[in-house]
Amino acid sequence: MGSRSLRVWLPALRTRSGADVFTMRLADGLLRMGHKPIVQWLSHEWEFASWMLRPLRMPTGIDIIHASAGIGHAFARRGVPLLVTEHQYVRHPAFIPWRSRAQAIYQTLVTGPASDRSIQLADGVTTVSHHAASAIFSVTGRRVEVVYNWVDTDLFRPLTTGAKPSDEVIRLIFIGNPSAWKGVDILPELAAMLGEGFEIHCMGGLRKAFPSEFGAHRGIKLLPGRPVSDMPSLYRKYDIALVPTRYEAFGYVALEAMASGLPVAGFNTTGTAEVCVNGETALLVARDDVPALAESIRRLRDPALRSELGAAGRGRAVTMFNESRSIQAYVNIYLSLLGERVDCN
């Protein structure tokens, strides 16, 4: 992990999104590796005026500041290196069609410029996928390092029992904020195409629950929100993870499902296609091809196919997206920014 314990300041907005999960997992991982993360949670309202965080006092003895790109610019030039992580580069042209009008205005005037300012001022920049890195470079011209998100594969793990018989109801889990870019609008059509023998269970993301009217559609059931700590056991109750995302920088749901031994069914787009391997850990189809998605899901009635894809997904999660690999990558970047030797063993 390097020659000494690092004190890492993690100022972070409480956004009720995957960025919160990232900060918590990063702090836990750094602590387990013998470092000293100092998480400072800030109200989400600071996002409206992130420059006003500049007077925030830095804790004593800090070696590295690590913040999201949304607020990182406020912590530049503090006398210690600043690393910013961009989780979802919203100014990329491929994302624009999936924003609401309100989102477009807010991201154009507030969060987009703040992120670009952070990317410009930071000593180092990381992002969570090669797709996101390309998006950042296409707009800002800055090349950034990719460090994949990760899961604790000891917590997210498959059941030890065998697959369900193929004549039982196949249950799919959809987790995410009910938005167009998550593909929520295709769920009623998909449920109707699948018909008897399939159920789509839907749980909103950390920010927003599903509208109650979705529960009126045949084949769709709404789930109450769960704390993050309940997610490993939740995945193990299902047969397939449904990820019809139209645009994704990374895709925590696909990864958590893979680590839990579930096959993924969804659209072959951006971050989802980078996390999954179509035909090996997932069955992915062209974006918005709902009939093809329904056919892929019908193929997954076969328990042997589900087991094969699930096992491959589990193996990919353990190999490519494990905690120690990603945390060590961040530690190596910290050391590099400090001008210290990086242990590549």
Image (tube, helix red, strand yellow):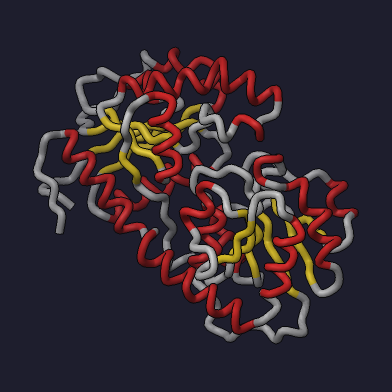
Location of residue 125 with respect to 268 vertically, above or below? above
Q: Nearer the viewer, residue 146 or 227?
A: 146
Location of residue 185 with respect to 114 vertically, above or below? below
Quadrant in the picture for residue 194: bottom right
Q: Nearer the viewer, residue 295 or 324?
A: 295
Q: Is residue 260 visible?
A: no
State the image coordinates of residue 322 (x, y, percent, origin top left): 37, 60
State the image coordinates of residue 70 (x, y, percent, origin top left): 46, 26
Q: Nearer the viewer, residue 78 or 286?
A: 286
Q: Is residue 122 visible?
A: yes
Look at 38% across and 31% down and name the residue there.
137
State the image coordinates of residue 108 (x, y, percent, origin top left): 57, 19
Quadrant in the picture for residue 265: bottom right
Location of residue 318 with respect to 34 vertically, above or below? below
Q: Nearer the viewer, residue 265 or 176?
A: 265
State the image coordinates of residue 222 (x, y, percent, origin top left): 78, 55
Look at 50% across and 70% down and name the residue there.
280
